[in-house]
Amino acid sequence: MKICIFGAGAIGGYLGAKLARAGADVSLVARGPHLAAMRDRGLTLIEDGERLAVPVSVSDDPAALGPQDYVIVTLKAHSVPPAVNAMQPLIGENTTIVSGVNGVPWWYFHKIGGPLEGTRLESVDPGNRQWDGFGPDRVLGCVVYPAAEVVEPGTVRHIEGNRFSLGEPDGSKSDRALTLSKALSGAGLKAPVRPKLRDEIWVKLWGNLSFNPISALTHATLDVLCTDPGTRSVARNMMLEAQAIAEKLGVTFPIDVERRIDGGAAVGPHRTSMLQDLDAGRPMEIDALVRSVQELGRITDTPTPTIDTVLALIALRGRTAGLYG
């Protein structure tokens, strides 16, 4: 079984190192200094206080790797559509595309059933590049929970978490989902196959939708923005608007808004990914995390006044920083 991880940054590097250490036939697509460092000395994983150098197969040329059984995409959401053409040499007749990307996935309405079946989302798949370039029947959903960071080229530090929830768009426990789950489990990761992966997508999205833009606008860490009365109220309103959308789409939330916000506060003085991107001068994931929910509000005829306001502010902040649009 051949597995390729396309986008071997923090999460992709962590996943690749775990699979390679377990003996899987895994390759990584990377670029720049990170690629050069991994070619020279392998991929170094720092986990539980242990520093381990793992030999990995790495390239910046997908054509050199050839068709794969699984291509696990761990790029930032806005980086995927421009990469679809470059990924084509990895895709054979039976290749599965595993979408490990934050936010609302481009395949969300594939095999969902009902009147919205097959609806395309311009905010996350402009011009239908992924829908047409990958094909929705290839996709296997994935909700990524671990936190990791690239501390220097070729070195990834694992922070917390080891769960990669998998799910078919139609909710079935397919052979391809179970096979990948077994491979990930063999690498010491948790990889449950969920019949209702969209429910998990929304619980994670609740936090990403609200905490990320609020933190980027205020430069507050999670513990502060989740306990300050003003920003907590803004986050709550955004989450309630998102919940109204999701429930119209058949989603069930296992916890309530207050508990979700309390969970964010419990993480402590964490700087969200959007705040980190802003500070580092990297493009910001505004469309996948926020604009996509606004688009779903329009599709389901659900008002989103707070989301609209925060989106307008963070989009302008991103544009003025040259990191969005």
Image (cartoon, rainbow, N blue to C red):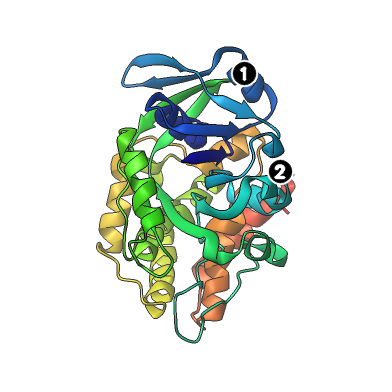
Residue at image x 38%, y 70%? 243
Q: In the picture shown, does residue 161 fall above or below 172?
A: above
Residue 39: mark in rendering: 1
Specify the quadrant of the image occupied by residue 168. Answer: bottom left
Evaluate whether residue 309 shows in this view.
no
Q: In the picture shown, does residue 298 fall above or below 170?
A: below
Residue toward you, 76 or 114: 114
Quote the CA–CA distance across marks 1 and 2.
33 Å
Specify the quadrant of the image occupied by residue 31. Answer: top right
Say what secondary structure mark 1 lies in. Answer: helix
Q: Residues within 10 Å of mark 2 (few under 14, many from 20)?
A: some
Q: Nearer the viewer, mark 1 or mark 2?
A: 1
How far across and how far down the image is residue 294, in percent? 55, 69
Amino acid under disc 2 = Ala
Mark 2 = which residue?
Answer: 321
Q: Quick one: label 1 or label 2, which is nearer the N terminus?
A: 1
Residue at image x 59%, y 63%? 291
